[in-house]
Image (tube, rainbow, N blue to C red):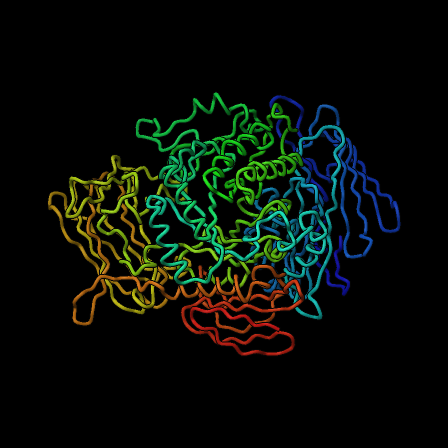
Amino acid sequence: GSLKTPDGVELAAVDKAPQRLFSLTVSRQAEPPGEPITVGSWDARAFSMSRVSASAATLTYADFSNGVERAVCTVSADPDGLDLRWRIEVVMRDGWVLENVRYPQITLAASLGAAADDDAMVVGASKGGVTRKPGSLKKGQILAISQPGSMSAQFGCYYDARAGFYTAAYDDKGYPKSLIVTRTDAGVEFTWSRPCFATGADSQAYDVAVSTFTGPAGAPADWRDAADRYRAWAWTRHWCAKTLTQRDDLPAWLKDAPAMVRFGRNWLSDPDGIERWLTGFWQKHFPKAPLITAYWGWEKLGSWVTPDYFPVYPSDEQFTRLVARTRALGCHAFPWPSGYHWTLTYVKRDDGSFEWDDRARFDTLARKHAVHNRDGQMYLRTPGWLRGGNTACLCGGDPWTRRWWNEDICAPLARRGCEMIQVDQVVGANWPACYADWHGHPRGRGRWMTEAFTEQLTGMREAMRKIEPDAVVCIEEPNEWFNHLMGLQDYRDCERKGEWASVFNYIYHEYLPPFQSNPRRGNRVWDAHCLADGQMPHMVPSGKDFQEVMLANGGFDGLTADGTFFRDWGKLSGYKGAVWNGAAHVDTEEKHSGLASMRLENKTAGDIVQVSQNVAAEAESFGGGRTYRLSAWLKTGKLARPNGINFGVFAPGLKSTGQGGQLKFPAPGSGWQKVAADFTMPDSAEMLRIMCHVSGEAVVWVDEMRLEEVLADGSVKEVVSSGFNSDARFMRRWVELYHGEGRPWLAHGRLMRQPALECAKIEYDGRQVPAVFHNAFRAADGREAVVLANATREPQAVTLTWGGRSLPVTVAAHDAVLVKR
């Protein structure tokens, strides 16, 4: 078929043979269900079409060989003439089940114009991004997003400078669905996929819209034009009844443009250190503003080990005291328990046993409430952070699970003073499809999941507010259906590999404040993007904020509160799916000096162990093209193959600068040896990564590691942080704007189409990004502003074209500029 814009631009693959309109997945009723079979529109042996009005038609497909009685498709023109609306009803034969519907399947041209160079695609993904030249993708390549899950807004678009294709699902009830884009032989196919588990007649209960769009007033088409079309619908839904500032169900401090800081398990091992950072760094250098204190690693056994959380780490008394004392400083505690996950086993030993085994308790209390797969088996997962262990997942559709989460997880945290809780690892309100009908829900995915999770969030907030009257709830990654129940939004758009497009925030910025969930200290590109995007400032604290030695705990004498590991160092559990089973020990007997050394030990040829630390570049004290020396005292007991302490200097995006080296472990029996290597920190450097990495059978020791600057006369001095450095100044500017002068726009305003900005480009993560990020906002009173955020550590001269004027602006190295009109 043809799909033309009002100006006559053809977008469909009209030069190719007609493609399927729909595809159905069916199976025979059985226990477990029968093998899935695909049935498509081409498989119908009977077809008829009728016009039900001047603007609507019905297409009926019948006489299928497998399971389907008939499929009735309706297509109608929207009353305002903007788009076509599509629906489908499928009637199954007795003894058959409908498990999935893909409809409509629309194939667009592989090149929208004479060339594909300016073609682009954007979908409503939680980690939004731009896919350039979709027609150049390998045939068969698929991009898919699902709601609940990785889809935060129900639309997608494919466009070039002249015009674009737009599709959306106008569903405000919460039916699970996917938007699937496939590079086919014929072109680029868009289709909406709806999972179900239905017998008899099944009708799609919402419209799928298909349309075209162009840029405003002759401007090139852009994904924001499609997003504007979608948000015109979304803003009329119940999840947009009130903007953030209009809501009366949230505490006043949350509407007061707060910032956030995240403290990990190492920080929690020394609660006094957290208070020191808050009073000696935050309160000393930053404007007075509410501060959300997110805590990772508070769980009793280890980070993300569930659900035997209590007493929390480092102890109930220390944690509760910390929360109370920091609340007096204007802070609001924010832990992230791991949703419906139930850790069965944790840290697998060589003999096959586990350091933690909760299977017996799980079988007694929770097995019958867990997710069960289509084949009747219980769902299991083996994530890397469990170090060889595995986890089950409770079903949110089971009332027992929802009560357990509210009363056994959230209420105890509220009693310890936590005002905010994130349902972590239930990404976008999604959990695995459950077929356990004894839970009281239909089998497979369905709207019941949205209804159950709405009840979960509502009940969670009520349970917390019996203890903390101003309690706030949050989930990992956005799902628009729940905007009105949450007070802030975990957001991870910077984690997308490739060009970013902050789709969810563009649509919903004035309704729900996002924060970048996993900020990277010293990553100015991320920080500049987030500032310009109107995201909440989110800081990563460090002892280096107090002018301390840049290489932290190089003597390996500083231990966590439980004495089991080294502060400021991290042990990797694996890489790219491979589990690293080697061990790292605190050794107080064999050491070169001080209280302890680090012993790395592998028992088999296949074992690997790595303990790492990143040292961020600082122009003032660790960078600028100067020469440095990394040294350590090393000893070898056994070493089956050459190994060493590897180190590398990286630019943003983990791009190698070509600088680095290795401190090789000495020969066995040679005792303690000092090993050193020199390197340069180029201006482009973002960090030094130190990796104590050993593979194969080995027993080695590391002690007294030092990072020193090599001076002109050949002498050395230890590298000490300059304290309030360029990155800290940038973060202070971010807080100043977000909480202060820029609040009507950055915290509470509506994102608008970007004005043109001429600026330099920089290399980041294998692609070109602007040296200055920018966005336009409209405040609630109609005033408009553009924010410019410098993504480099040097001044940038730019030209902003806005409102018919060209404005030259210089943005200082650690600065962001607000231009108002």
Q: Quarter holding the C terminus?
A: bottom right
Looking at the image, residue 782 sits to the left or right of residue 338; the answer is: right
Question: Toward the viewer: 706 or 164?
Answer: 706
Q: How many marks?
A: 0
Please tell me which residue is depicted at 51% across the width and 24% down the height of the picture: 367
The foreground one among 579 and 253 is 253
Residue 174 x %, y %: 67, 41
Residue drawn at 43 percent across, 31 percent down: 308
Residue 140: horizontal and vertical position, in percent? 58, 47
Q: Position of residue 269 (x, y in %)?
A: 33, 43
Residue at image x 75%, y 37%?
A: 203
Viewer-side residue, 421 vs 319 = 319
Q: From the viewer's perspective, is residue 697 above or below residue 139?
A: above
Q: Furthest-front residue in view? A: 328
Q: Is residue 54 left or right of residue 456?
A: right
Q: Is residue 85 visible?
A: yes
